């Protein structure tokens, strides 16, 4: 009985660990993992096992800036089962990273984007054992094409962060409830009065879209939409980008 009481507050309880098979992931691409559950000092009944893809997003609440956890995806991996004391269980898992997952491996002086997988054992009347694995999320090929075009156009990535909300562009809308903003500044001379350009990717099936906010001196902000796919070459996208930014 004493061991059960200790387990209910997390001492000697079952532990869970998600072991990812990839060092780097991409939005909209498959990934795999092994979820390892190690039994504690006593048998424990769990009502379920879940894996959640989470990001941290900035939001405005009552005129204050706060940071909230936003679940982009949730996978239910098992229902009720018994974790026997001292036993180890390994569950293979395969999934697809949500296409709107923020990218975290981009440069910039201030990359504030965070993404992780959170694994949880649902234990009744006890502290739920959890495991958090931070993810390295790289741009997809279509995203890379635009990032290279931005650099070729003379813009440098300055900052990346994630905000709470939805985006709407010409023929596309975001779905996840959070979106990433990549902030670019002109390298060297101010290009056509542009102070900064913010890019947010919005995947849509085989198409990639971007909502682009252009901040110009004396003219304020303007919003433009851009769409392309994996077959679009960098020179072609560069020309589209130049026309879009103006």
Image (cartoon, rainbow, N blue to C red):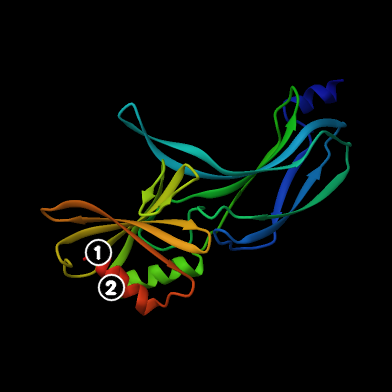
- Find residue 185 and report its image quarter: bottom left
For this orientation, the residue located farthest to the left is: 218
Query: In the rendering, at what x and y percent does residue 8 appear?
Result: 76, 25
Q: Is residue 145 left or right of residue 150?
A: right
| Residue 94 lies in quadrant | bottom right
Q: Secondary structure at mark 1?
A: helix
- Which residue is at a point 39% across and 37% down the rendered structure image? 59
Cα distance between the residues tagged 1 and 2: 10 Å
Instruction: Measuring from the top left, give residue 113's x and y in whole percent.
Output: 45, 51
Please give left or right for residue 83 compared with residue 242 in the image. Answer: right
Residue 62 visible within the image: yes
Tell me the quarter of the image containing the C terminus.
Answer: bottom left
**Which residue corresponds to the image point at 30% horizontal and 66% vertical from the top-left?**
156
Packing grade of label 1 (10 A; few <14, some 14-19, many >=20) is some
Residue that label 2 marks: 153
Labels 1 and 2 touching (C-beta < 8 A): yes
Q: Which residue is mark 1?
A: 245
In front: 180, or 161?
180
At horizontal 78% and vertical 25% (from top left) the residue drawn is: 6
Q: Secondary structure at mark 2?
A: loop
At label 2, counting other C-alpha atoms closer than 10 Å, the crowd grade (few under 14, some 14-19, many 20 or more) is: some
> Which one is in front in this view, the residue at disc 1 or the one at disc 2?
1
Above or below, 240 relative to 27: below
Q: Quadrant of the N terminus?
A: top right
**N-term mark: 1 or 2:** 2
- Camera-nearest residue between 48 and 146: 146
Residue 5 in percent (x, y) is at 80, 22
């Amino acid at each position: 009985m004493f061991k059960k009481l200790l387990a209910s507050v997390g001492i000697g309880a079952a532990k869970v660990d998600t072991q990812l098979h990839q060092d780097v992931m991409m939005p909209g691409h498959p990934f795999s993992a092994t979820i390892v559950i190690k039994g504690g000092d006593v048998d424990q009944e769990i009502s379920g096992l879940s894996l959640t893809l989470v990001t941290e997003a900035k939001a405005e609440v009552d005129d204050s800036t706060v940071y909230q956890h936003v679940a982009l995806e949730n996978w239910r991996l098992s229902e009720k089962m018994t974790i026997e004391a001292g036993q180890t269980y390994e569950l293979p898992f395969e999934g697809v990273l949500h296409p709107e997952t923020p990218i975290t491996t981009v440069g910039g002086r201030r990359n504030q984007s965070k993404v992780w997988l959170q694994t949880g054992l649902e234990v009744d009347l006890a502290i739920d054992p959890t495991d958090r694995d931070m993810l390295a999320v790289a741009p997809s090929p279509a995203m890379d094409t635009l990032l290279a075009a931005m650099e070729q156009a003379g813009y440098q990535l300055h900052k990346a962060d994630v905000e709470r909300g939805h985006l709407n562009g010409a023929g596309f809308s975001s779905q996840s409830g959070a979106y990433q903003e990549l902030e670019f500044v002109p390298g060297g001379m101010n290009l056509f009065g542009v102070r900064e350009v913010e890019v947010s990717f919005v995947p849509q099936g085989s198409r990639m879209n971007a909502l682009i906010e252009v901040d110009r001196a004396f003219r304020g902000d303007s919003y433009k939409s851009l769409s392309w796919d994996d077959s679009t070459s960098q020179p072609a996208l560069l020309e589209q980008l130049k026309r879009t930014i103006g």
